[in-house]
Image (cartoon, grey):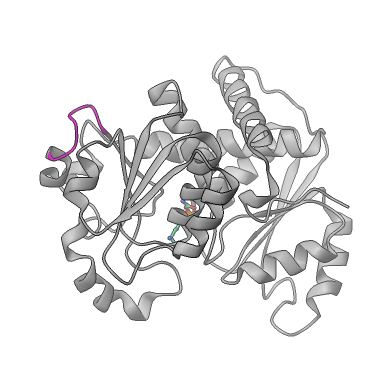
C-alpha cells in the first residue's frame, strides 16, 4: 500500500517533525547553492479541480529541483468529467507517476482516488483540508520563533479548510491555537474534541472576540472570507466578517512583536488591509516561498523512505 497524505491524520507527530526537519535542511542547502538531486527521473502528476498559484507551481519547482519533472492535468483533461470512472483514472495515472497531488472540492474524492492509486497521493487542498499549507506555516513559525511549543497562533476569520488543518497541526506540535470567528462560522466542536482526545496537552480555543484573542498572539493569521466555491456567499460573508478585518488597529491590540500571516491569495481591503499586508510585521511572502521548501521536504521524505 502506498503512503498517502490525504490529511494530517496520515502523519504522527514524529513523522510531521521529520518532514519539517527535512524541509528546513533542504532549504538551507538550496540557499547555499546545493540542489540535492534526491529524486532523479521521478514523475509528479498534479490533478487540480480549482485554480492555484502557490501549490501547483511550488510542487512543480520542488520536483524539478530534486531531479524529477511534473505533469499537470485538470479534472476534464483527466477524464473525470464523466468520461471515465475515478478508479480507472486513478489506476492508469498512478502507473505513470511516482506521486500525485490533488486539489478538489470534495475531501472524499481525494480519499477515494488514493484508495485506487498505486503511488502516494497528497492533498493539495480540498474544501475541508489544506495540510501542505499548515505544514508550511509550522515551518515558517519555527523559523521566526525558533520553536513551536507554547507559541500562540491566532487565526482571525472563517473556520475553513486552512483553519482546520492549522488547528490539527497546532495540536500535533504543542502550538497554542485560537480561532477568532463570528458565530455560525466556527470549526465543528466535535472536530476540536477529537483532537483534544488524541493530543491531551493541546490548547485549542474558539472565541467571537478578535481583540481579546490577539492580545496574547505571537502570530496573527487570516484567510479569505469566501473560499473557492463560496463565491455566491461573498456578499453575505462580507457582512458577517466585517468586524474581523486584520487592520492596523487590530494589530495594535496584539503585542508589538507579533507577526502577520496569510496563506494567500488575499483579498486586500477585505480580510486584511494593505498596510498590514505590506507592513513590517508581515511574513506572508516568507510563507509563500516556504511552500516550495516544504514541498521539497515532503516529496523527499515521502519518496525516499
Ligand atoms: N495558499 C495556496 O494554497 O495558494 P494557491 O491557491 O495559489 O495554491
Ligand atoms: N480557504 C481558501 C484557501 C486558498 C489557498 C480557499 O479554499 O479558497
Q: Which residues are magenta?
A: 253-258
Is residue 66 shown above or below 71?
above
Judging depth in this view, the residue of 203 and 79 nearest the camera is 203
- Residue 246 visible in rendering: no
Q: Residue at x 19, y 31 (%)?
A: 255
Instruction: Residue 120: say if magenta.
Output: no
User: What is the x, y in percent for residue 289?
Assistant: 47, 36
- Residue 51 visible in rendering: yes
**Extreme residue in the bottom direction:** 82
* Left or right: 237, with 176 as reference point: left
User: What is the x, y in percent for residue 279?
Assistant: 20, 36
Q: Quadrant of the C terminus?
A: top right
User: What is the x, y in percent for residue 164?
Assistant: 48, 56
Judging depth in this view, the residue of 185 and 204 nearest the camera is 204
Judging depth in this view, the residue of 293 and 107 nearest the camera is 107
* Res. 24 image quadrant: top right
Q: Residue at x 63, y 54 (%)?
A: 7
User: What is the x, y in percent for residue 105?
Assistant: 56, 71
Q: Residue at x 61, y 21 (%)?
A: 25
Ligand 2 in which quarter: bottom left
Is residue 18 shown above or below 56?
above
* Res. 34 image quadrant: top right
Magenta: main secondary structure: loop
Amino acid at each position: 500500500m502506498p503512503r498517502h497524505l490525504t490529511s494530517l491524520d496520515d502523519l504522527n507527530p514524529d513523522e510531521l517533525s521529520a518532514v519539517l526537519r527535512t524541509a528546513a535542511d533542504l532549504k538551507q542547502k538550496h540557499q547555499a547553492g546545493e540542489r540535492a538531486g534526491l529524486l532523479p527521473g521521478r514523475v509528479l502528476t498534479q490533478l487540480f479541480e480549482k485554480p492555484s498559484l502557490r501549490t501547483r507551481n511550488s510542487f512543480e519547482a520542488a520536483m524539478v529541483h530534486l531531479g524529477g519533472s511534473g505533469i499537470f492535468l485538470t479534472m476534464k483533461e483527466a477524464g473525470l468529467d464523466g468520461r471515465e470512472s475515478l478508479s480507472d483514472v486513478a489506476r492508469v495515472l498512478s502507473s505513470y507517476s511516482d506521486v500525485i497531488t490533488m486539489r478538489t472540492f470534495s475531501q472524499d474524492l481525494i480519499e477515494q482516488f488514493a484508495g485506487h492509486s498505486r503511488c502516494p497521493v497528497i492533498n493539495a487542498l480540498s474544501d475541508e483540508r489544506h495540510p501542505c499549507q499548515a505544514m508550511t506555516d509550522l515551518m515558517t513559525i519555527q523559523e521566526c520563533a525558533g520553536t513551536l511549543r507554547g507559541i500562540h497562533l491566532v487565526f482571525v476569520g472563517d473556520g475553513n479548510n486552512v483553519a482546520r488543518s492549522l488547528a490539527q497541526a497546532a495540536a500535533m506540535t504543542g502550538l497554542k491555537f485560537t480561532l477568532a470567528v463570528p458565530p455560525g462560522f466556527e470549526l465543528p466542536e466535535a472536530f476540536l474534541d477529537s483532537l483534544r482526545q488524541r493530543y491531551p496537552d493541546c490548547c485549542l480555543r474558539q472565541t467571537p472576540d478578535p481583540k481579546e484573542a490577539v492580545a496574547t498572539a505571537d502570530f496573527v493569521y487570516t484567510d479569505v472570507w469566501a473560499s473557492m466555491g463560496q463565491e455566491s456567499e461573498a456578499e453575505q460573508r462580507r457582512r458577517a466578517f466585517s468586524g474581523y478585518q486584520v487592520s492596523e488597529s487590530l494589530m495594535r491590540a496584539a503585542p508589538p512583536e507579533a507577526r502577520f500571516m496569510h496563506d494567500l491569495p488575499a483579498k486586500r481591503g477585505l480580510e486584511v488591509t494593505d498596510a498590514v499586508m505590506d507592513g513590517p510585521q508581515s511574513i506572508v511572502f516568507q510563507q509563500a516561498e516556504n511552500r516550495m521548501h516544504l514541498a521539497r521536504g515532503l516529496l523527499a521524505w515521502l519518496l525516499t523512505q
